Image (tube, rainbow, N blue to C red):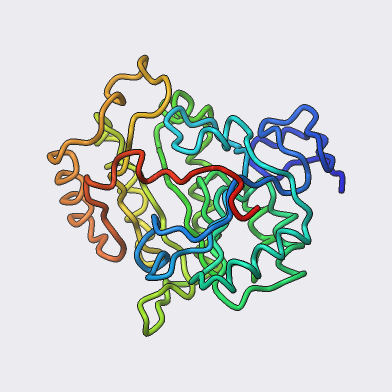
Amino acid sequence: MEFICNLCPRQCGAKRTENENIGGYCGMPSLPKIARAALHFGEEPCISGTRGSGTIFFSGCPLNCRFCQNAPISQGGFGQTISIQRLADIFRELEAAGAHNINLVNPGHFANSICKAIELYTPKIPVVYNSGGYERVETLKMLDGKINVYLPDCKYVDVALSKTLSDAEDYFQYAEDAILEMARQTGPVQLGADGLIRGGTIVRHLVLPSHTKESMAVLDKLAQHKDKFWVSLMFQYTPIGDISDIKGLDRTLTQRECDKMLDYMLSLGITDGYTQSRASAGVHMIPQFDLTGV
């Protein structure tokens, strides 16, 4: 499989073959490249449940977040290239292992391969699209009817901060449209009698130390559409990599920052969703990228 890629907002026109990426931002081949496929318990309660989410971690990324916890695979490119048939088989294997859902982490640059894999084997459990939020609506429309749950980030509103931290000054421009498209496809959040998610969109926002004003701006935007999706306010920020040049990001959040953001979210009437505790911060939340299940 070979194609000229414009799947993500970069629209870099890379030539992607089965094993190469020529001139592209993400550096990924056309076939899926993954670093881990296993049961995972680090998601929201309605996703992880008691048996875990069947999580597939894709390599590469259209963003370059300075604080990325998955940097070895998102930026370092670690992983193994597999066939589309193998991806479909992994869906089946995770389902057989008792997963509550199939959780595709950072999947956008492999959207066409994912569509084909779902056509080869459509899981009997919900399919979750777990994304950084930097997506093209045109690409998401390819997935309409194939994805049950969208789990996008909404990282920033500020253009300069988006550029500094993720090399994407147009981040919110795309994320806002993408989130509304996701919510259109799924409709409101639906939980089963067991409390597990069956469909819907949950928007995540990671609060950054010393940047609560920016988080407030993000929540202001999300509050305008709060009837369309749930919000997951995340306090798990952990300093990763070399971020010494960015003020305030060399530490985890204070309890005061967490309380401030929770109070502000509630003041906006955002009551459907989740809020993490400060204890969620730390490297213990990061899985081992060791080709398990590949």
Q: Is residue 92 above or below residue 217?
A: below
110 with respect to 70 (left or right): right
Rendering coords of residue 12 (x, y %): 72, 33
Q: Closer to the camera, 142 or 57?
A: 57
- When asked about the image quadrant of residue 22, the answer is top right
125 with respect to 277 (left or right): right
220 with respect to 167 (left or right): left
Rendering coords of residue 71 (x, y %): 51, 33
Rendering coords of residue 2 (x, y %): 87, 44
Q: Residue furthest bottom?
A: 193
70 with respect to 14 (left or right): left
- When asked about the image quadrant of residue 56, the answer is bottom right
Q: Is residue 171 above or below residue 204?
A: above
Q: Closer to the camera, 245 or 186?
A: 245
Residue at (31% x, 26% y) in the render: 249
Labels in figure, total: 0
Rendering coords of residue 129 (x, y %): 55, 58
Q: Residue furthest top?
A: 245
Q: Closer to the camera, 226 or 148?
A: 148
Residue at (51% x, 66% y) in the render: 149
Q: Is residue 8 above or below residue 92?
A: above
Q: Is residue 122 above or below residue 24?
A: below
Q: Residue furthest right?
A: 2
Residue at (31% x, 63% y) in the render: 273
